Image (tube, rainbow, N blue to C red):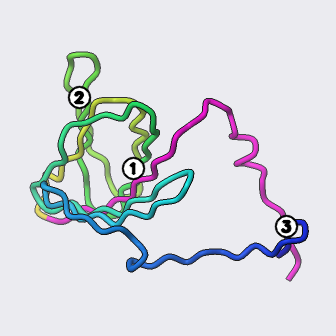
Amino acid sequence: IMDGDKCIKPEILTPGDAIREVKDCGSRVCNYMFPEFEVHLNQLPPRAAQEWHYHRQIEEIVVVNSGRLTFCWLEGEEYREAPVEAGSLVRVKGSVHNFENRTDDTVSFTVFRMVPDGEDKSSIIKHDRTVVEG
């Protein structure tokens, strides 16, 4: 497929391309870093919890792939929590939050991190698809 005069080549990244990290809570993370966003593949072991934190500038979307996470957050001074099942996602926004695995199984989830600029791009995202004949 051509974009103007240049050929667009896709990228396939493997675990060997990721920055691997094991956090203090035991969470295993594969970080894929890009100039405008990041994708993190996470495995949180049984009965483990991330540290409480928040983000000043980034938007974080968490998609649970397998298992069940407990999403915990503060609304003002009030503590809240909700279970998040496989196939569901959390838009974290700027909340003070953490994720806990209260089960006996490892939970797998993917985190998408980006820095929003305040511009509504939903129309572009919804409609930017050109069908080509093979």
Tell me which label, 2 or 1, sits earlier in the chain. Answer: 1
Q: Which residue is mark 3?
A: 3
Please state the horizontal and vertical placement of residue 38, each as a whole percent of the image. 47, 55
Q: Residues within 10 Å of mark 1 (few under 14, many from 20)?
A: many
State the CA–CA distance, disc 2 to disc 1: 17 Å
Tell me which label, 2 or 3, sits earlier in the chain. Answer: 3
Please state the horizontal and vertical placement of residue 124, each as a whole percent of the image. 75, 45
Q: Say which mark, if any, is on residue 80.
A: 2
Please state the horizontal and vertical placement of residue 5, each as a whole percent of the image. 90, 70
Is residue 122 one of those drawn in magenta? yes
Q: Say which mark, if any, is on residue 62.
A: 1
Residue 123 quadrant: top right
Rendered residue at 88%/78% (across/down): 133
- Magenta residues span 105-134
Residue 24 quadrant: bottom left
Q: Residue furthest top?
A: 76
Relative placement, left or right, of 117 versus 72 is: right
Q: Residues within 10 Å of mark 2 (few under 14, many from 20)?
A: few
Relative placement, left or right, of 10 versus 7 is: left
Residue 55 quadrant: top left
Tell me which label, 3 or 1, sits earlier in the chain. Answer: 3
Q: Quadrant of the C terminus?
A: bottom right
Which amino acid is tagged 3? Answer: Asp
- Count of labels shown? 3
Q: Secondary structure at mark 2?
A: strand
Which amino acid is tagged 1? Answer: Val
Which amino acid is tagged 2? Answer: Arg
Q: Secondary structure at mark 1?
A: strand
Contact between labelled residues 1 and 2, with CB atoms less than 8 Å apart: no
